[in-house]
Image (cartoon, rainbow, N blue to C red):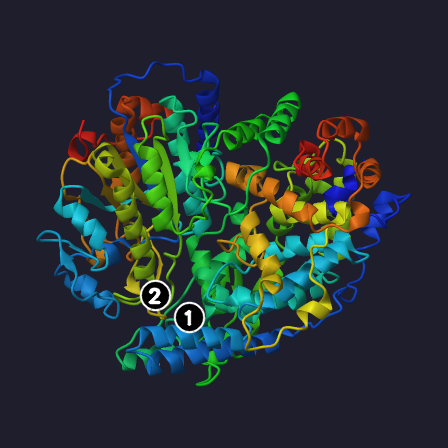
Amino acid sequence: MKISRRNFLKGSATTLFLAGFNFPVLANTDKKKNLVVIMLRGGMDGLCAVPIIGDKNFEKRRKDLILDETIKLNSDFALHPKLKNFHNLWQNDLGAIVHATNIPYTKRSHFDGQNLMETGGHIPYSIKTGWLGRGMKLAELKGDGLALALPMPLLLRGIPSNDNFYPSKKRLPRTELLQLLKSVYTDKSEHDLANMMEIIANRSMMNNGGTSMSRKNSSLAYKAGLELKKINGPRVAVFEVDGFDTHAAQGGVDGSHSDSLIEMDSIFKSLEKGLGSEIENTLVLTLTEFGRTIKQNGGRGTEHGYGSAIFMAGGLLKKSQVYTDWPGLKRKELFEGRDLNSTIDARSVYASAMSSVFDIDFKRIQKEVFWGDELINLSDKLFKS
Amino acid sequence: MKNFFRKVAFGLGPDDKTPSDPLKWATNQLNDIPEFSWKGKILPEKELRKYYRDYVYGDRKVLRKKFKNDKDGYKREKNKLRHATGQKFWWNLELCIRYSEALKSETPVLAKLWYFWGNHFAISEKDFLAQYTTGAYQREIIRANMNQNFEKMAQEATIGWSMIHHLDNDQNVGPKSQEARWAREKGKTKGVNENHARELLELHTVSPDCGYTQEDIIQMAYIMSGWRPKWGKKRLETGDVHFNPDAHEPGTKIVLGKKYKNGRKSLSDAITDLVNHPSCRKFIAMKLCRYLITDNPTEEMMEPIIKAWEKSDGFLPEVHKAAIEVAFNYSDKYNKFQNPENWLLQMSKMADVDLIPSPSFMDLYKLGNKPIKDHRALERLMDELGQHPYLAKQPNGWSDISEDWMSPELLIRRLVYAREAYYKKSDKSQTTEYYEEMIEKNYDNPGEILKIIEQHRELVHKHVILFNLPETLKS
């Protein structure tokens, strides 16, 4: 019988659930290691954030969007001048970049693309869990996820009892009431609701002096850093930054793409502040649905493209580097004649990162999180073992 | 069965009698579009767009230049401009109009479907659309067409000023058009912007299920090129939408195998074909079932809706009636997790919460002043609950899937705002008898529910528990 791709993926996802996750974790080290993922929604322009130096094809195609005064990273690549915090990390071997990379999705729809960047799959909406949630399940990290957002991101689904933090100014009802609801949920087999109520009842974060907290990403990141630092705190955190979809008025150094990049940069800074020395045991990665066209459009913006870049930060990085298999920007080197190509499946980076941070054999992640897709183990090149 | 009233509307309030024929009660609400129940001021979209223009022009063309070396002065004057143009007020007024239809009208079923369509043709968070025009767009283009064919709604939404601006079609210029040529002569580039074309196919009509290609999207974008606001030095991008042939891509275009001649008429012809594509009615039927009945609609659920569509040529009252009847038939078998907005309205209706400020209070607001806290109560509440209807994150609107609403923070909001709402109730509704009667009227298992809430003595606690029981969260 011929199995279609869709059925195959569905089938293997089911197997994943039925098989259970009772394998022992391969290597358990003493230190608690953290993984942070920042989702950049709207399509982050890797060539705006990390432009190539001295490429005529690039300069010709987006002459109104070329940045002045970029920060030189090496002989080939520069950094957007507003990414000052990332640059500090870079100078201390705590920042690196993977360039010309993306998830294997080429159709340029935000909704399909964002679905796939979170599920890690090939067919939009066919998988209901996130690659990070599945990886956590494999590592038996139940209750160790924290989303700094109001709805729970798809990326973290696949393991129950994740927490989210996006503070409300009002006080919670009394504990007895929460306990009653929890027992009602349990009696009625509403397991998801019961799980949520358990987290709510145990929440310690709410009671930090009762002061109202800002929901800015920079403030959330500081809070998350403090939580990740705790030995019994969460091990995984997820952030969201919106606004990368700059079809118009993308602008230069002070344009709208810069605003979103600056927000991302503020997360790096606050996380570092909150984590303190534990930044050494943390790895931060960015994730986006696609890059943007090289050519500027009619509105001095850019269209949905393909290849982008991944920002990485933290002490679990091997060194500062721009890791890339650069495809070039001549017309015939571009994807469909218009986009930066992706020469590294971004999922190879995420699988390698989970392997390093969760201490799980890469092949198991490849097989059980990414359905045995052809991914490359980059752990040795990018991360400390 | 009683959960049907909560499933397709917001439950029964203290003055509502239990209808003897629930299905008829619901479907009778779908034939006409009554006047708004809101008795205060209602501004036309065109007028609100002028306020938007005043803000954009004042900021971009005046203040930024005048205060380019004075950051604080700029900030101060910009705040003045915000209030002079009602930036923090209009969307609160729109929410009053919106929620009156759920709580005070004779047609709450129509209101629940209005919210569905507003979210289907969503204007998501972009610039200051939410603060000025999104509410009016949902009144004048979405609700006003709910007694028309789907095609008419799709045609008007597509070339509505809000949608054109929201999805960047004002930036969409045919690469071989006159305008692109002029641009090249000046050493500039102008070209196609696919955004709106893609969403028209993906989100508004046929959905990716129909199998369109990237080439179909580009061809659709060519068809759409030239549709944009009339630009003017003073009105900037806020003029009425028109077709500008100078920016239109010449030549024949092909979308999903059909040919379209160059020109103004090609867009409405293409929309006609899209809405008549089998994938479109299937997609809409699936979404209606997903909104009203379950996260995972079955073919059997969708079928009667698709049939009603085919029989009536997509006449929305008939499509709606079919959807409501399916919801009725599956009422006992499926419960749908209610999104925060529908949950809030359900609680407000059944428990008699004074959610909406009065028209006379709202009309006290004077342009130029900073609105007081109570004028802004609804905007803040919706933001806190995690679902401001005019601030969806993406053009696909707010999610209909329960998982997307299941997180500790979102449930915390329901706990704390159930409590807040209790203190906005009339005295007469703050009695045990009131609750007993309301539960009897709105739930299929009143005995069981009363037994649970009786475990807490204070009425406010009973209230918080009731509105966080699975029976309420899922209707």
Which residue is at 33% across, 60% downward?
A: A259
What label sits on residue B306 in the rendered view?
Answer: none
A343 to A199, vertically: above or below: below
Nearest the eye: B56 or B463: B463
Q: Are marks 1 and 2 in contact (CB under 8 Å)?
A: yes
Q: Residues within 10 Å of mark 1 (few under 14, many from 20)?
A: many
User: Farthest front residue?
Assistant: A209
Query: Does A348 sit left or right of B231 as displayed?
Result: left
User: Farthest bottom residue?
Assistant: B233
The disc numbered 2 marks a residue on which chain? A
- Give the image quarter of residue A164: top left
* Residue B204 place in picture, x, y as percent: 57, 56
User: Farthest right residue?
Assistant: B20
Regarding residue B60, the answer to whether it shows in the image is: yes
Q: Which residue is disc 1 drawn over?
A: B171
Regarding residue B398, the answer to whether it shows in the image is: no
Query: Does B435 sit left or right of B122 as displayed?
Result: right
The quadrant of the image that shows the C terminus of chain A is top left
* Residue B36 place in picture, x, y as percent: 75, 65
As shown in the figure, which amino acid type bears the numbered disc 1?
Gln
What label sits on residue A301 in the rendered view?
Answer: 2
Which residue is at 34% across, 73% downward?
A: B72
As shown in the figure, which amino acid type bears the numbered disc 2?
Gly
For the residues labelled 1 and 2, the Cα–Cα distance comes to 9 Å
* Residue A119 place in picture, x, y as percent: 42, 36
User: Farthest left residue?
Assistant: A75
- Give the image quarter of residue B388: bottom right
B470 to A299, vertically: above or below: above
Numbered disc 2: secondary structure: loop
* Residue B73 place in picture, x, y as percent: 36, 77
